Image: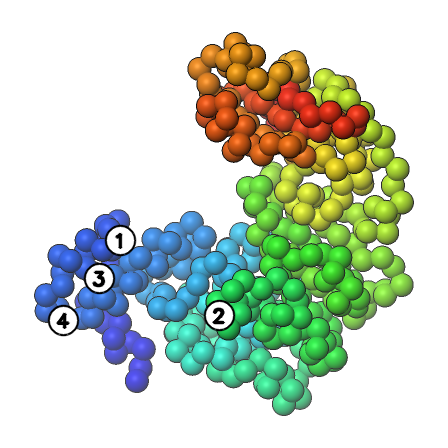
């Protein structure tokens, strides 16, 4: 049965006419007989509303179909997919876990032959249709409904780049993080993957243990932690056949929402050797961006920007003079504040202050609840543990970037 048999022109028009409306209310109002499947139409409206910010190209195209089963959680955003275009190039690309086709389509802009693999038949059919609506050059996209490993095992073709995003949900819908637990298992299938391409790019969970992943796949030649608006979105493990295996794997921490993004770069061997000074809070406190924190560059960050750490396990840094372009949030220290009701009431009489906690006995939410504080305004209360083991709190104000 052709996909377009259900997705009629009347259905598409209904979707466009009611894009801004509440899907549940629409279903109630239009539940009587229609010339099209009203549940299908309302499902399209709901999907477009969810995808508007993450996938604007798809959401803005009135002819695109969103599958019923699509999960936007693991699907790449357009920002991260376009970023990945800068990491790979060549003639031929195969996406072994095609899904909704976001990576396939956007990575494919720079390739002349693209193969999309997806084992769910309906999803593969929808993506084939969508490619024809998204691109005038859709003939270069070959879509195949097959199991990724079965297809690759029987394929004689060599590819410049393999892209793979293993499923991170178990049989009981539990979230999975380890590479070896995901499907396909890139660790057990590594000999096959590395024999079929010059470059293998693996998208992994933001919760991935980076050191464990490099122990599982020591062949990896570079690792990228990708954040957008201070939220880690993806961890990318890349193997390049031409790269040296003798060097320590470089790790790149990216914040894509910054102007002209540049990575913070380090490796675990160098990180282990860095000697960092501990110090008391000076004029400024610095919190690295989440990509740097996720990557584990705790000492390398301090060394590069000439900062002192407040405590071995407090990822909060201090200095009296700041380097330009520090990748993180910078606060000017106004004064130390006692964490008691009387002191806090006197300092923040409206009860409005942004509360942050770093390696402090009390989490930020607990502090707000105990002292009846609420986030907001220009003032910050930063609670932390100092080099002498003392728990402290500081009234700070954010320094404009």
Badge nearest the viewer, 1 or 3: 1
Which comes sooner in the sequence, label 1 or label 4?
1
Which circle's residue, 2 or 3, is located before the other in the chain?
Answer: 3
x 80%, y 41%: residue? 300
Determine the residue located farthest toward the left in the rendered image.
Answer: 32
State whether residue 150 is above or below residue 324.
Answer: below
Nearer to us of marks 1 and 2 is 2
Q: Mark 1 highlights which residue? A: 19
Mark 3 element type: helix
Compute the Cα span from label 1 to label 4: 19 Å
Secondary structure at badge 4 equals loop
**Quarter occupied by residue 136:** bottom left
Q: Position of residue 72 (x, y in %)?
A: 45, 59
| Numbered tag placed on residue 13 in the rendering | 3
Q: Secondary structure at mark 1?
A: loop
Q: Which residue is mark 2?
A: 172
Kindly identify which residue carries mark 4.
35
* Cα–Cα gap, marks 2 and 3: 38 Å
Q: Going by the picture, which residue comes out furthest to the top?
A: 346
Spatial separation of the CA atoms under disc 3 and disc 4: 12 Å
Residue 293 position (above or below residue 234): above
Within 10 angstroms of label 2, few (less than 14), some, or many (20 or more) residues? few
């Amino acid at each position: 049965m052709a996909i377009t048999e259900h997705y009629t022109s009347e259905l598409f028009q209904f979707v466009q006419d009611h894009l801004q409306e509440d899907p549940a209310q629409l279903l109630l109002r239009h539940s009587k007989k229609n010339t099209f499947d009203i549940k299908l139409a309302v499902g399209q409206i709901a999907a477009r509303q969810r995808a508007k910010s993450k996938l604007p190209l798809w959401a803005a195209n009135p002819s695109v179909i969103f599958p019923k089963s699509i999960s936007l959680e693991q699907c790449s955003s357009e920002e991260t997919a376009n970023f990945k275009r800068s990491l790979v190039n060549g003639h031929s690309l195969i996406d072994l876990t095609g899904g909704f086709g976001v990576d396939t389509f956007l990575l494919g802009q720079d390739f002349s032959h693209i193969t999309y693999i997806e084992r769910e038949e309906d999803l593969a059919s929808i993506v084939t249709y969508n490619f024809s609506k998204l691109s005038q050059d859709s003939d270069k996209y070959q879509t195949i409904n097959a199991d990724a490993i079965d297809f690759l095992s029987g394929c004689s073709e060599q590819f410049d780049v393999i892209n793979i995003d293993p499923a991170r949900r178990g049989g009981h819908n539990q979230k999975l993080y380890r590479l070896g637990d995901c499907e396909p298992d890139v660790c057990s299938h590594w000999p096959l993957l590395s024999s079929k391409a010059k470059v293998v790019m693996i998208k992994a969970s933001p919760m991935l243990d980076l050191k464990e992943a490099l122990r599982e796949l020591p062949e990896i030649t570079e690792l990228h932690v990708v954040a957008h608006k201070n939220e880690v979105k993806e961890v990318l493990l890349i193997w390049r056949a031409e790269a040296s295996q003798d060097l320590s794997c470089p790790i790149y921490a990216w914040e894509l929402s910054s102007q002209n993004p540049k990575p913070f770069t380090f490796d675990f061997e160098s990180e282990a050797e860095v000697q960092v000074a501990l110090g008391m809070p000076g004029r400024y406190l610095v919190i690295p961006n989440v990509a740097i924190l996720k990557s584990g560059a705790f000492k390398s960050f301090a060394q590069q920007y000439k900062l002192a750490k407040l405590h071995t396990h407090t990822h909060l840094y201090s200095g009296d003079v700041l380097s330009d372009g520090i990748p993180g949030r910078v606060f000017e220290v106004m004064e130390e504040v006692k964490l008691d009701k009387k002191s806090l009431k006197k300092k923040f009489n409206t009860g409005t202050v942004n509360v942050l906690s770093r390696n402090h006995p009390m989490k930020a939410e607990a502090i707000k609840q105990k002292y009846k504080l609420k986030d907001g305004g220009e003032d910050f209360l930063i609670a932390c543990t100092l080099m002498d083991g003392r728990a402290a709190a500081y009234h700070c104000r954010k320094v404009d970037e």
